[in-house]
Amino acid sequence: MKLIDINLLPQKEKKRTAFTYSVLGTAGIFIFIVLFMMLTWQNMIADTNRIDVKIESAKKIIEVQQTKVLGAETSGGTGQLSDAVQKMMTYPVKTVPLLNELISLLPERGFFREFEYSERDIINLTIQFDSSREAAFYLAHLRTVEWIKEAEIIEITTQEIDEDESNDILPRYLASYSLHLDSGKLDALLSEKEEAE
């Protein structure tokens, strides 16, 4: 006789294998990473667009401000320049008579090395003397002149002489002076001298 195996109990489901779970897990992680990257990328694009808009508006503001500043500088600068030119034309400094006056105060062996206006009423001089004593005497003479408000020695230096030259040559002294002129008195004095001539 044969026996028949009848099983009235429900059949057990087969357990899913580890491979299936690993494939599903990897697919889920991949989908999650792709979604995260897409959202991040969209946020970055939105931020970049916002920053570009801000940059463009800042450039426009800078351009407007620069045109305002240039316009103000051009209009104000032209007016100031034309005023300065008019002043210079109406109030010339008579340099030759001024130089003649300064030369007349020099000692016999004093020579001008440099003469420059640092401002309209300030003259810087460099003069060569045979001794430092002559430089001091010249300063004393300058201080007695009524059209010079202030006179001062800025520096006295000795001019080096080469050893090849004769020993009979004395060293030279260069004195730098700063003179502050009284324009009103100087103009009056120069106009008197012109009338006398």
Image (spheres, helix red, strand yellow):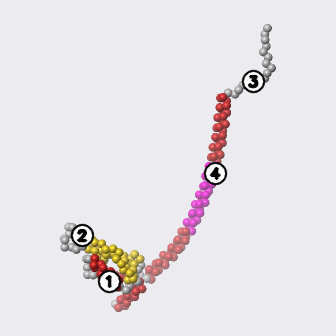
Q: Residue furthest bottom?
A: 196
Q: Could you give the CA–CA distance between mark 3 and mark 1, rounded to whole angstroms?
A: 130 Å
Q: Which labelled disc corresponds to residue 141?
A: 1
- Quadrant in the picture for the N terminus: top right
**Quarter of the rendering containing residue 27:** top right
Residue depicted at x 66% and y 39%: 31
Q: Secondary structure at mark 1?
A: helix
- Decide which of tag 3 and tag 2 comes sooner along the chain: 3
Is residue 47 magenta-colored? yes
Residue depicted at x 38% and y 83%: 148
Relative placement, left or right, of 29 versus 111 is: right
Q: Could you give the CA–CA distance between mark 4 and mark 2, rounded to whole angstroms?
A: 78 Å
Q: Give the image location of residue 76, x and y in percent.
A: 53, 74
Q: Which labelled disc corresponds to residue 46?
A: 4
Is residue 77 magenta-colored? no
Q: Could you give the CA–CA distance between mark 4 and mark 3, rounded to whole angstroms?
A: 54 Å
Q: Could you give the CA–CA distance between mark 3 and mark 2, rounded to whole angstroms?
A: 121 Å
| Position of 63 relative to 102 (above/below) | above
Q: Could you give the CA–CA distance between mark 1 and mark 2, rounded to whole angstroms?
A: 29 Å
Relative placement, left or right, of 10 versus 156 is: right
Which contiguous range is marked in magenta? 43-68
Residue denoted by label 2: 161
Q: Could you give the CA–CA distance between mark 4 and mark 1, rounded to whole angstroms?
A: 81 Å
The answer to whether residue 103 of the structure is visible from this angle is no
Residue denoted by label 3: 12
Q: Nearer the viewer, residue 59 or 10?
A: 10
Q: Give the image location of residue 100, x and y in percent.
A: 32, 83
- Type of amino acid under label 1: His
Label 1 Cα neighbours within 10 Å, binned few <14 / some 14-19 / many ≥20: some
